[in-house]
Amino acid sequence: MSSRSDKLGFSPQKEIIYNKVLPYSESVDEESNSQIADIKANLARSVQLKELRPGVAYWTARLHTYINLYGRKFSKADHLAFIQLYHELITIPDLEFKLVESFSKTLNVLLKKRNILSRDDLVLPWRPLYELVKRILYSSYEQLGMQWIPGSIEGCLKNLVQSARVYFSDESTQEMLDEWRPLMCPFDYTMEVAITYFVSFLPTTLPPEKHHMGFKLWIDEFLQIWDSYHNSPQWEGTLLELFARVAEDNIGYIDWKPYIEKFLTCYLRGFNLPVGSKKLQVARRTKGYANGVMATLIVAMMGKDQEALTHLKTFFKAVESFFHPSNAGKFTFKLQRVLHKIPQAFINRLHRERYAPESWQNRIPEDYRLTESDITMFVEAFKPVIFLAIFSKMGHLDAAVGLQCLSLVRPELVIPQLLEKTYAALETLTEPHQLTATLSCVVSVARSMLKGRKRFPEGPTHVLPLMMAVLPGIDPNDFIKCMITFQAISTFVALVPLVDCSQAHLHWTDLTEQERELCSATAAFEDFITLFMERCFILIENSTFEHTTSQDSTQAKVNRQENLVEVGLASTFSTMLNQCSPQIYQVALDKLFRYMSSRVFETKVAGKMLASLCRSTVKVNPTKALSKFIPHCSRIVLSLTSSEEVQNEVELDNELLFNLQVLSEIVRCDSAVLLTYKSTILKVLRATLHLRCKQGYQLASTVLKYFLKAMTIIYPLEYCSIAEGLSRPISEYLPIRHWGTTGDVESLNIQWHIPTPKGVEAAKEFFDIFFHPEIEKIKGFVQGQPLNRDELLQSLTIILNTIVGMAFILPRWNKEPLADVNYSRADYNEMHLTTGVPDTGGVFNNTREEVANLMNDLQAYMLQNHADDTKSMLHIIVIYSNLVSYFGCSKEEYNSRSHSFALVKRSMEDKLRKNKRHLRPLLIDRIYLQHDFRRINSSKGLYTANDRVIVHNLVTLSTSHYSVVRTKAQEVLLQCYDYYSASRHDTVSKVLAGLKEDKDIPHHQFKGSLYIMVGHGRPPFACIHRWKVLHDSWLAIIQAGHSEKPSITAVMDKLMVKIQKHFSTVAVNYQVTDECLKAVDPLLDSAAVPAASKPGLSPDELKEATIWLEGRNQENTRIYNNLVESLVNLIEDGNLRWKFSQLALGFLGLLIRTDIPFPPSGVRLMVNSLVHEALTVRKIAIATVGAILKQQKRPHKKMVIDPVAQALSTSSSASEEGLNPGVRSDNTWHHYDCTHPPTKDEWEKMVFVEKTHWGYYQWPKSFEVYAPMSEQPKLGRSIEELSPGELAIYTAFSDADFVERLIRFLSLEERKGKDKFQSKRFTLFKGLFRNFDDAFLPVLKPHLQRLSEDTQESSQRCLSEIVSALIRGYKHWPYEKIEKLWEFLVPILRTVLGQMTVETIRDWNTCFTAASESRDPRKLYWLLETLMESPIRGDGGSFSDASRLFVLQGCLIQQEWRVPSLLHRLLAYLEQHLTHTYKNVRDRVGNVLSWIFLFDYTMPNGNVTTSPHTQEFASKLLPRLTALKKLVIEGGASASNMEVMEVQSSEDEARQDIIKLSKTVMKWLIGSIGKMFSHVTPEMLQFLPMLAPLETVESDEELSELACLTLACMAQSLMPSHIIPHAIKALEQVAIGTSWHGKCSMLQYMQVMIFYNLYAISQPQYVEQIKNLIVGLLKDERLEVISIYSRFSLFTCLSLLQLYI
């Protein structure tokens, strides 16, 4: 590193090591220093200029590119300076969302390599990031349409916090706990919010000496909370992420033993595996724990002893049968993921313990590190399930990854068994899936098989037999098998040099016996390659493309499978030849040449495959291969083209085309050898480039293209796994000892092809011979000389291929960037990168410009004279694309190769040792990718006049009359937009001009302009973050021409959808804080190395920047207001068609903001649109006016209070010390405990707490409530006091006619049977009542009265929306108005409660739920008491009673723990109706009971709730249900079936009541078990003996189904250890009972209960009790019981229990 410091002038943080292996590496250091100096200077100056967009945004992108090119190749000081700057930038108040996304990505990139910056180097404040996350991810404005937030920003922010939390201060943990603990109310959604914050932000990497300031502050508390929940709350999986992270970061410092069993139990339950014959599954709230999170946690808990491993082994034994291929279900996909997630986590930990470099992060204590016995036990635990899963249709890939991980540590345990299965599969003809599955697995362990010689020395001996055995898999009739065979062969030959070592024993005396056998076996390599080639030839012959008609032959396209086969074949053959010794290579070459020279194939499929094989052969040894192929092919081509007749034929013989195709492939090789045949290739090109046959001259052009590429570009010449090559004699080098060897970046010794002067001269010669004549032809054509279409297309084809072939040495045009499209004050410059371009003496400096000018002239001429020549037009477009952006490698080519590299790397890398221990060919490929990435970025320049001409030409062609031309031109144009951001702004006016409603604008121009606006996978024009462009684009769309064509309508609809999808709020007012300006100072430090290339701004320039920013903000505000006014005027003029009018209204909706008041004209338009005839317009208006009212909301004053002091003022009790979640003396003062309506004096003395979660867990340190009414802003204002926007709303809603029309529209039915309570309408009316007090009540009251009397569904829905909004809206009204309101509302509510219907019940439930949400229950006294008025009356029928209970339930649920007195009153009331006559009432009673007892939950270290307790209620019910047993016995005495309990009219009332009571109780149990937070109580289990016999009641289907479901819920419930004795006791009572049906039901119950509580029930005393229970039942007097228990129990229950015995 010291030498690097001397050379660079600083110590780099982390470089990309591949740059130093590039052939021009000596210039990279100077280049990178220049680049970072530019970035530092211009980024800092952009911030000082206060130009966030585009200045800072542009240089941020350049910093990204720099990191991708060089890594973090800057000093630690610069690294910290960048981090501080972006931290300040991202925390600018109200920063535009798109900039937040961009800056967060950059900051994340700077932070995520945590090993190069320690906590001592950097401390970041957590609160600014928290405020940012809260502002964006929990925005209350987004759902109102006042903020449009990009969907991708959430992931960016989460990644940023994940990287930044490592550097939060030591004190941050306590600060976070103080901030978010008050949110932790288990009954409220804020619990999930709090947990999400904790999981995201809490730092877990503090050093051991500071653990008391870190996880020790919360780990026990959070574990106890998690342990106390038994019903999978939504936040459980999130909290587990925190446990997994803290466990991984602090292995050995936390005792997980008390929780391991429950972790695995919950994990097991999360799969929802079908257990028992009934397979009745209970729906769960969550999908279980994420496999990746659980894998991390399980592996982190291992160490010191084998307890975690023992439990894991039990886990796999329990689920083993579910991995069987025949046992598939919904659970299969998730269960299969376990096979690779846990092994990967295990390997990652082993790497950290044994191979990872030293780091500042916590080291794992020695006594907690994994031992060899731990590793063996882990592998043994996995083996049974992973070998079962191999043959799964869905899971063999997961099994392959898992086996790869296991084979890295214990190859001797997994590979032999895998090979045994593979050999068996190779002999099976009827099950091809077995072969593909096992071969996939063998491929994954190939490297371990060769490298694990210490543990598995016989591994290499299987290579050749396997390679021979898989050859029949090259089957043209089975694509999948063929591809996996290619993969297997290429994997093995990449690891194994194919050298005959059979004579090694003559030279090496130290060979082991095994090495002798292996050397002897290598003699078969030659036979293997011969056989492989024969199979490939058969494949080629069977892939011949057959033409059905002569017309099809020119249009036929090769399907995707054939392409993949060709790629797989060529890749495998190339890998094989790269690994061959010269002798074996010669054999392969001779065989291939004999085959190729004696065959003729069509060029679509078979010929292409064979030509690819020839190319692979030539690349490995061009000297030998070219000497065979070029003379042969050129002789045939020259012979067949010697006559003039052939030159003029439209269709050529396949022999000529095939040999030309082979030539086009084999010229892709080392130029030094290829130059030997330059004259021959020149003759061939002279003879074929001007063939009349299109396919002929296309192939000839391809020959020219690849010849020029071979001469001019840089590329690796070989990919052998051994740097020294395979030509050394056996006496010097023994290849078998280097099987599977890895490459070393430091000593790769890559042989690069560097363009030589001779090669460049040859390229220039070919260029002059073939390029310039075609240029002259086209120049003549443009000037009027004759040239038919075929000749023109031929010339364009030659020009195109020449440009592509020469692209690497054709420089960009050296022009000044355009100033008139640059609206930035920041500096821009091109990124000059060294890519090894040879010196051409400036010969080609003007070539691109010359061709661009010629194509411009040609396009203009053709549009005027030959516009229908679409083929030539397409070539012109492609030439434009290559002139602008192609310099030897395209972005698409790079992305494709990069993706392929990542796949191969993932399958071949050493995940245990890592450290870039890849195969040498893979490393070479990675370095070549680095070169290509540099080539792509070196070609990017600034927008010049030449670029403008091309882009404008593309816009013209994008609106062509011909769709094929339009489509291609639009594709290339959008690529140019990506390439030059200025080009989009430059062409806006031209594109928008095509949308005008003008008779002179043809249909195709209009359609083309629309498609450009749409953007094809990119954000549309109308979403560009520049107000001028937005203004012009939106107005142009609204005023666009009209067309009835369906295609135009479809494009317009697509454009609207894309605008809605991609639009994000554009900032009007930008700001740059003083902190940002200070943060750039370190970047401009002249003492830094490298120093910034420019100084910072002077004080005068800084003042000028401030003035400029103010002016820009004012201009943005002006454009914004003008856009709104323009849209309003267009709509009000009435000249727009209905569709565009609605579209304009939608645009106005997008312009509602939080920072700028909506202009009054827009408010008036939207208010008037509320009563528009069109439903769509009304919907837009409702949503928009709701947002406007939110914008106009008056700020209400808040004050800080002391909750404890408030409690003391209402009670003499003092508050408890420490954490005491639940009901305490300091939080009961805001509970509902009203016995009478509050008086005015009482009301004004009350301190209202609106949010339900406050005070439950802990009070915040600073608790704010609304100040008294006297300090609040005036709501009931006069007209003079209203703003213009408020006045527009006030005037409309004070108008009786307006309100009457509005209510009439809102009362209409929209979609029969699908309408429901609309939150947008609710928001509208809520805003009205919130902002304007009761000003509109006099106008609304008659309508509300009328609607309450109208039983129509739509009228009731409208009323429910208004009533709910009215109750929520009076939040800040004075007492007198509220009291008066309820005098009016109560009678209306009583009316509607008595006339609810099936259609309206959901709406009224939503109404009362929304009204009660986030409101102090004391404010809702009148509502709550009205709903509590005898809900079960009987006067309106059973539905009426059930409905009133339903809406009461919805209202009370929102109040959660704050209404215990109401819950007690309701429970006492419902106890009287448990045996109600009607089923729907009983069902609702049972459901309400489950919600009442939901709040019977005590958090760890918390106080007992004052809400009703389950225990007390169950104790009351149990004696009443004991009569159920008597009924069973009595039924048995009088009938042969003991469970016959028919409820007939002749039965007495008591018997009926017991049956009804049991049904209600079961309904309650089902609901409670599915909802409650705590575990099943002992009292609940006491119901089991009474309910078990009811499952088989045939005479009462409802009773039977309820009993079955209740037992299923109880069986699947999570039971802690102390509950198990109660469960066993209940089972014993069933066993000693008289019902044999109950005993049989108990079997199913036991199976499920044991499986889902496997670890808790595994204690020896419980196991013994269950064994005795089963043995006792085997002695039962009933034969049916003995039979069923003998068949299932011993093999099901006991088999599970045996896991622990």
Image (spheres, rainbow, N blue to C red):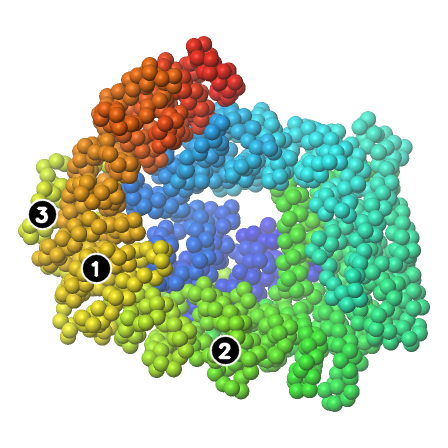
Where is residue 872 drawn, in percent x and y? 71, 77
Other residues around mark 1 within 10 Å, as few (<14) / some (14–19) / many (≥20): many
Q: Amino acid at mark 2?
A: Ser
Q: Amino acid at mark 1?
A: Leu
Of labels 2 and 3, earlier in sequence is: 2
Of labels 1 and 2, earlier in sequence is: 2
Q: For this view, does 179 lie left or right of residue 502?
A: left
Q: Residue at x 49, y 33 (%)?
A: 273
Report how far apart the C-alphas of labels 1 and 2 lie in the structure: 44 Å
Residue 1654 image-quadrant placement = top left
Q: In the rendered view, would you say 1027 is above or below 237?
A: below
Other residues around mark 2 within 10 Å, as few (<14) / some (14–19) / many (≥20): few
Question: What residue did someone put label 1 on?
Answer: 1347
Report how far apart the C-alphas of labels 2 and 3 lie in the structure: 65 Å
- In this view, the residue in front, 803 or 1395, is 1395
Q: Residue at x 75, y 56 (%)?
A: 716
Question: What residue did someone put label 2 on?
Answer: 1043
Report how far apart the C-alphas of labels 3 and 1 lie in the structure: 27 Å
Residue 1450 image-quadrant placement = top left
Q: Residue at x 54, y 72 (%)?
A: 1047
Q: Give SS at disc 1.
A: helix
Of labels 3 and 1, earlier in sequence is: 3
Q: For this view, does 544 lie left or right of residue 114?
A: right
Question: What residue did someone put label 3 on?
Answer: 1237
Q: Give SS at disc 2.
A: loop
